[in-house]
Amino acid sequence: MPSRMKEILDALKDWCDRENGQPSVVAKVIGVSPGAVTSWLSGEQQPTSEQILLLQEFLAKQKNYEKSE
């Protein structure tokens, strides 16, 4: 797995491990099934390049939201 993809998936796992971070929320926002997100987090599957970009955008928005609180 490319290192940048691993960084993004690690950040996603960190977000999902927090109190309100659920794979179903990520899935809904980026337009995939919750099972797909779970498969990425477990390492069973890898997201496509487009999905990685959507994950990056999602995580950036979450980070900006957390900073504003």
Image (cartoon, rainbow, N blue to C red):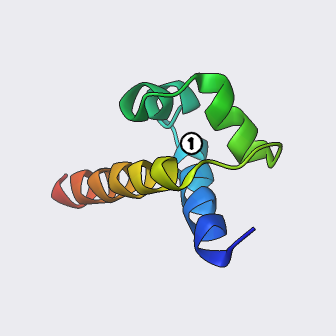
Residue 26 image position (x, y, % from top left): 46, 35
Query: Which residue is disc 1 drawn over?
Result: 16
The outermost residue toward the front is 49
How crowded is the residue under tag 1: few (<14 C-alpha within 10 Å), some, or many (20+)? some
Q: Identify residue type, mark 1.
A: Cys
Image spot of residue 61 (x, y percent): 27, 52
Which residue is most to the left? 68
Q: Residue placed at 46% from the left, 50% from the top?
A: 50
Q: Nearer the viewer, residue 59 or 18?
A: 59
The quadrant in which the N terminus is found is bottom right
When asked about the image quadrant of residue 29, the answer is: top left
Residue drawn at x 74%, y 37% as measured from the top left: 39
Residue 24 as seen in the image, left or right of residue 30? right
| In-front residue for pair 13/44 | 44
SS type, badge 1: helix
Q: Position of residue 36 (x, y in %)?
A: 65, 31
Relative to 1, is 54 on the left or the right? left
Q: Residue at x 76, y 44 (%)?
A: 45
Residue in the picture at 58% in, 54% down: 14
Left or right, 1 with respect to 24, comes to right
Q: Quadrant of residue 23?
A: top right
Name, please, the residue furthest toward the bottom.
Answer: 3
